[in-house]
Image (tube, coloured by chain):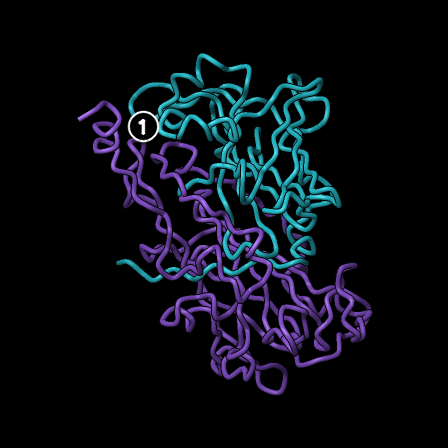
Chain colours: A purple, B cyan
Amino acid sequence: MDERSAVDKEVAPATMQSATDPPYLYPDYVSTRLRAPSRPLVLVPHVLSEATGPIFGPDRVMAGDSDLTRQHAGDPIGERIIVSGTVRDAGGRPVRGGLVEIWQANAAGRYRHDGDDHDAPLDPNFSGFGRVLTDDEGRYRFVTVKPGPYPWRNHRNAWRPAHIHLSLFGSQFPQRLVTQMYFEGDPLFFQDPIFNSIPREARPLVIAPLDMANGRPEWALAYRFDIVLAGRHATPFEHGDDD
Amino acid sequence: MNLPRTPSQTAGPFLSLAMRWPADGPYVVPEGTPGAIWIRGRVLDGAGDPVDDGVVESWQPDADGQFAIAATTGFRGFGRATTGADGAWALHTVKPGRIADARGGLAAPYISLAIFARGLLKQVWTRVYFDDEADANQADSTLRSIDPSRRGTLVAASTADGYRIDVRLQGHDETVFLDV
């Protein structure tokens, strides 16, 4: 046994790749063809750089950042919705004070971004992004409008199902997750290569069901999106079961 | 308990709506910080074309090897830069101190990077090591575990105001990406 294999055995790093993730290369999603790494990932031992992560304070989030319908003088056009859920790690522990950032198209399927040339109107009362910190139980909540589907040029007559982008931080940098939340019952899933890049059995994990209990009567329907980040690494410097 | 993890999805072409922090994203340390450097580079695709719609995030300890422990005081440790039309990004930071490696020794100094973009169904992870740390790099157990012909993709070159390193997502000279 040479020195290196002895070290590998001693350190026994665990892969952080998740069986629920899509592969890097999914040729039906054309943009992966020139951007997916082609070489195997190199497994690295977990040290403090993997056991720590950015910490965000209340100053990173402004009052009103979690209500995308109240960022302008008037109400945005569209179906007002409440999106809420919990952020936990794979061990079931709530992520406290985790930064959640979202961005999305407006109700007509148009992003307020220079790169979006879809022939649909911008809404002067909708920017389409927000942020919030999770509370002590790992909960988050946004008020927004339901985004519209929109066409893209991936293949002939390609349309993205309605979705909201979410970016999440846990307490350790490798827990970092960017994902998309879809809506229960969307008829466009069958032809979307981004959604279908997820292994079939894991696809329900990105579909938010209607959540009548958390809606507000006479005001808004709700959707529930619970999020699970990677488990926290234990290191020689802490106990894995501590918070 | 081992809950199934929420699948990753691409950040798409419009990630800058939320993931660009115009005021301070690229500033791991404020302007005027003693010892501050710029780490500059490009993100390129498998054809060598610039990735002009990505975000590069960084995480590192301070110059003494200490990681941030609070939101409101001291060293932030985190940076966030969007890529421009030429694929270029830049982070204003300090060179990190050395931290303990997994064998009880010291790792060569490095900064962890995560890169997000359209066409990346999940982020890629890599590191920035420094070309003026030849002895530490030579002894670093992580660098030593990487094929010598590819190690150089993780090592930034010294420049007048800091360091320079490109991230090549695919192909010849593909950057070494990590399973962290």
Q: Chain of mark 1?
A: B
For the C terminus of chain A, the quadrant is top left
Q: Position of residue A230 (x, y in %)?
A: 38, 52
Q: Quadrant of residue B32?
A: top right
Q: Is residue B108 above or below residue A169?
A: above
Mark 1 neighbour class, 10 Å CA radius: few under 14, some 14 to 19, many 20 or more? many
Front position in the image: A96 or A187? A187
Please tell me whether residue A15 is drawn above or below residue A186 in the rendered image. Answer: above
Residue at the far left: name it: A1
Where residue A238 sits: x, y (%)? Answer: 31, 35
Which residue appears farthest toward the bottom when viewing the image?
A218
User: What's under tag 1, amino acid-wise?
Assistant: Ala
Q: Residue at x 39, y 67 (%)?
A: A199
Residue at 48% across, 49% down: A176
Helix, strand or loop for disc 1: loop
In the image, residue A198 lies at what x, y percent?
Answer: 44, 66
Q: Taking B50 as reference, is A94 above or below it?
A: below
Question: In the orientation shown, which residue stands out farthest toward the top?
Answer: B135
Residue under the point 52% across and 37% down: B175
**Count of numbered circles in the view:** 1
Image quadrant holding the N terminus of chain A, namely top left
Q: Which residue is mark 1?
A: B102
- Residue at (70, 20) in percent of width and height: B161
In the drawing, does residue B147 fall left or right of residue A54? left
Q: Position of residue B145 (x, y in %)?
A: 35, 29
